[in-house]
Image: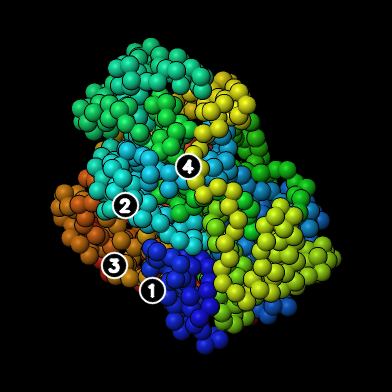
């Protein structure tokens, strides 16, 4: 049995050399997840890319705009594929330079940090002359831009979050906006060693902590929390939170001393609460009319929050929406008004429950990674503006106080991500992907993005290559020697880039003269030596490689976010312009954005249950993360397949909404709005608030050939809106949109995405 790490946990496996014969959870994991079974069942699935392919139209007519996603693929040898691609890269860099290459390549790829595909592709493109990159993530588009203005940068907030052990020991009330989802905290970038969500919540309960979950889904928090469930209309949390703030303000419950010492701008915000800006007092009665939550319940909650040690956590999902900055900012403001920031068990947190790595012990060091080199091209896009960029070369847009222009992209290079999973309004993305001269994709699977590429190169899975890895912030560092041979002709991304670099005359620059094995040893030993100098002894490479996971040194087992700032705000100022928490931000105000003004506000989104559009599309689609997989990864794996309904992704509706439409569990339904539609299998469930349709992301996009706005499988991004959260952040807003649902009539179309695309020999 050898140990292996994935983004969703570690497992022990036996192998016959070509496939895994037995998989069981790593013995160190107290709460293992069934997601680990997707790996073995996916490895030799027909949708693995078995060799290199080139799109027929591209092969016949050469580079240029084309109907990507509709064509056949031609199998070619590695030699042919690499020669063709090297030639095309040489042409594009010669004619246009790196300014015409989009290499953002957003995506999670796999665990295992040397073969991290984004690091690999960035290092490679840097050797050629650089690329247009991306900023921020789909996860935290609004947060990453907002938080440095008002509190701290995202890196600090993640790495220096109050540890879950402190919450479990000291919090008396946890108010979780967006819940503390056990499905989300199964996962962490780079891997999770010990899952502990149910554990810390159970301990907190035993210590007398009460949980309140504010979410459209009752099961966004584990049963162990025995939580009170409050379900405002999605997208209306800002109004709910403003009313909490208004109660604190009007009843003298705000901690004025804390506000005076540690924050700026409270007076301007309080004026807005009191009705001084728009004539509307933001009281619970006002919030009830927006959120649907009884005023009395809001008032009672505010008083309870002020009376005890209260922790406020806001999930990442709340900011993945139009005006997503507002509930996040209000989470910070409420915690400041309670005056408990920097105290054990009190204050503000972001994403406890969104991923396993929030609130871990503070690590002294992160494991070694492949250096990416320097990018000579300084142009970038906010990551979720990919379709806008491809559709509007030279077009103007605003971002974080800047007036910017989209570049003219000729070549798109993607390794380790799936924009036809992650982006909104996929039919629009498909139109955008028709524009460039060439699209290159490396992937182990015929992902929807690979199907929209010109050159498709088959990548190995982690079980097929040597690597090592630790999750972000995780204390265990795993050796990950290959467990099997690669499927078909699959090769490591590193090998592909090394071959291309050699052909383009930058072989030595890319490889540094090292093989994978030499890199692993070199990076490990260099890192070990650095740690030794600081007094930390770790095993040498050979002992590490042939042994078990090792424990990384910690800086602190327990940590309280902003405790140093609280103790001494002069010596430990925040890295905001004022050095304090900014309840009013002069910087943001100076940008003049009505969609994100100088203090948090309630703004009505275009698509929520209170908007005029709800007359035609009366259901709020919550497109959250999937329980049975990570994003689109291994959707053909057995655990992911086990919840499909006649092959379609399940959509959950409240019994009342199903009855009103004459729908029954197991029906195939059509989910639609003006942008597109998808099929899904119906699951009726009273854990879903009325008015909500919950369809997780991740079903592989299976466009109807006659109508690419229709997905036959159940990908919610067929109907989501491709619009930024605000001009400030331009963050992803995929979480919420409005739809209607009806029974699917006529024969059920076959899925094509569970088989490879059509191929032809030339
Ligand atoms: N509607 C809606 N949309 C959303 C969201 C939402 O809430 N609602 N959430 C968004 C969020 S937070 C995120 S992070 C994104 C996730 O979007 P992505 O990170 O793009 O999704 P993944 O499915 O993880 O894509 C990874 C791809 O890399 C491939 N891969 C894995 N390992 C390797 C490797 O070693 N080499 C290569 N070359 N390829 C590899 C996988 O097969 C897969 O195709 O989705 C976003 N999209
Ligand atoms: N199993 C699994 N875990 C994952 C992932 C995965 O793909 N699969 N992806 C990982 C990634 S990349 C990320 S970024 C994180 C994302 O972490 P999150 O963004 O927190 O996760 P989501 O599942 O998108 O949303 C969490 C919950 O928020 C609730 N919600 C949605 N809209 C609203 C709203 O307006 N108000 C309130 N109060 N609640 C709302 C939904 O009910 C939803 O279930 O998850 C990570 N964890
Ligand atoms: Mo994410």
Is label 4 or label 1 in front?
A: 4
- Give residue 34's position: percent from left, percent from top: 38, 68
In contact (CB < 8 Å): disc 4 and disc 1: no
* Residue pictured at 38% horizontal, 54% vertical: 197
Residue 567: image location, x then y, percent: 53, 28
Q: Mark 1 or mark 3, which has the lower sequence index?
A: 1
Q: Which residue is mark 3?
A: 645
- Foreground label between 1 and 2: 2
Q: Which residue is mark 1?
A: 638
Residue at 71 percent across and 73 percent down: it is 517
Residue 276, above or below 282: above
- Image coordinates of residue 456 in percent, x first then y, are 61, 69
Which dot marks residue 162? 4
Q: Quadrant of the C terminus?
A: bottom right
Q: Position of residue 472 (x, y in %)?
A: 56, 54
Q: Are marks 2 and 3 in contact (CB under 8 Å)?
A: no
Is residue 409 or residue 646 the one in the foreground? 646
Q: Secondary structure at mark 2?
A: helix
């Amino acid at each position: 049995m050898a140990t292996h790490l994935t983004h969703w946990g570690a497992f022990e496996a036996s192998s016959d050399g070509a496939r895994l014969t037995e998989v069981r959870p790593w013995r160190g994991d107290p709460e293992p997840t069934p997601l680990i079974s997707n790996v073995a069942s996916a490895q030799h699935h027909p949708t693995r890319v078995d060799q290199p392919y080139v799109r027929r139209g591209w092969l016949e007519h050469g580079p240029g705009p084309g109907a990507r996603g509709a064509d056949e693929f031609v199998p070619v040898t590695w030699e042919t594929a690499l020669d063709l691609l090297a030639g095309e890269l040489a042409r594009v860099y010669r004619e246009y330079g790196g300014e015409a290459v989009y290499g953002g390549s957003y995506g999670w790829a796999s665990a295992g940090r040397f073969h991290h595909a984004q690091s690999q592709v960035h290092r490679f493109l840097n050797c050629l002359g650089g690329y247009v990159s991306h900023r921020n993530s789909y996860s935290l588009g609004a947060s990453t831009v907002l938080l440095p203005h008002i509190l701290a940068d995202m890196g600090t907030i993640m790495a220096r979050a109050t540890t879950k052990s402190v919450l479990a020991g000291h919090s008396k009330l946890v108010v979780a906006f967006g819940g503390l989802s056990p499905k989300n905290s199964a996962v962490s970038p780079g891997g999770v060693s010990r899952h502990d969500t149910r554990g810390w919540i159970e301990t907190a309960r035993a210590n007398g902590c009460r949980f309140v979950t504010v979410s459209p889904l009752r099961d966004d928090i584990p049963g162990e929390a025995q939580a009170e469930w409050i379900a405002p209309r999605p997208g209306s949390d800002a109004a709910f939170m403003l009313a909490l703030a208004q109660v604190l303000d009007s009843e003298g419950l705000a901690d004025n001393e804390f506000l005076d010492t540690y924050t700026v701008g409270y007076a301007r915000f309080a004026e807005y609460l009191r009705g001084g800006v728009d004539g509307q007092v933001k009281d619970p009665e006002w919030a009830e009319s927006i959120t649907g939550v009884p005023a009395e319940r809001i008032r009672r909650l505010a008083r309870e929050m002020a009376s005890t040690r209260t922790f406020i956590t806001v999930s990442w999902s709340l900011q993945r929406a139009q005006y997503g900055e507002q509930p996040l900012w209000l989470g910070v403001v409420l915690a400041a008004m309670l005056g408990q920031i920097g105290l054990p068990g009190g204050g503000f947190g972001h994403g406890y429950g969104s991923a396993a790595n929030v609130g871990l012990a503070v690590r002294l060091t992160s494991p070694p990674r492949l250096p990416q080199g320097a990018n000579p091209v300084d142009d970038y896009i906010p990551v979720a503006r990919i379709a806008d960029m491809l559709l509007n070369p030279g077009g103007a847009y605003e971002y974080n106080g800047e007036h910017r222009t989209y570049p003219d992209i000729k070549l798109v290079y993607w390794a380790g991500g799936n924009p036809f999973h992650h982006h909104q309004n996929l039919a629009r993305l498909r139109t955008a992907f028709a524009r460039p001269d060439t699209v290159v994709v490396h992937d182990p699977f015929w992902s929807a993005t690979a199907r929209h590429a010109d050159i498709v190169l088959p990548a190995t899975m982690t079980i097929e290559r040597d690597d090592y890895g630790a999750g972000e912030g995780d204390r265990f560092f795993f050796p990950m020697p290959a467990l099997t041979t690669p499927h078909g002709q699959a090769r490591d991304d590193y090998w592909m880039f090394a071959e291309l670099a050699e052909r383009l005359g930058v072989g030595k620059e890319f490889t540094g003269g090292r093989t994978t094995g030499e890199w692993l040893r070199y990076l490990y030993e260099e890192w070990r030596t650095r740690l030794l100098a600081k007094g930390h002894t770790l095993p040498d490479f050979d002992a590490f490689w042939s042994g078990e996971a090792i424990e990384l040194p910690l800086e602190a087992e327990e940590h309280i976010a902003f405790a140093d700032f609280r103790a001494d705000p002069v010596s430990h100022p925040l890295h905001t312009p004022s050095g304090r928490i900014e309840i009013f931000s002069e910087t943001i105000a100076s940008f003049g954005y009505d969609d994100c003004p100088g203090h948090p506000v309630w703004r009505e989104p275009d698509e929520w249950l209170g908007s005029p559009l709800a007359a035609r599309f009366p259901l709020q689609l919550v497109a959250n993360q999937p329980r049975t997989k990570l994003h689109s990864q291994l959707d053909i794996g057995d655990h992911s397949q086990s919840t499909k309904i006649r092959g379609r992704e399940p959509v959950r509706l409240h019994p009342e909404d199903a009855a009103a439409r004459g729908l029954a569990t197991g029906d195939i339904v059509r989910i639609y709005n003006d942008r597109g539609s998808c099929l899904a299998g119906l699951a009726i469930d009273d854990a879903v608030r009325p008015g909500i349709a919950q369809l997780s992301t991740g079903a592989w996009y299976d466009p109807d050939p006659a109508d690419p706005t229709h997905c036959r499988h159940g990908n919610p991004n067929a109907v989501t809106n491709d619009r930024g959260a605000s001009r400030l952040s331009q963050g992803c807003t995929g979480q919420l949109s409005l739809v209607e649902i009806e029974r699917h009539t006529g024969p059920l179309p076959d899925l094509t995405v569970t088989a490879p695309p059509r191929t032809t020999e030339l």
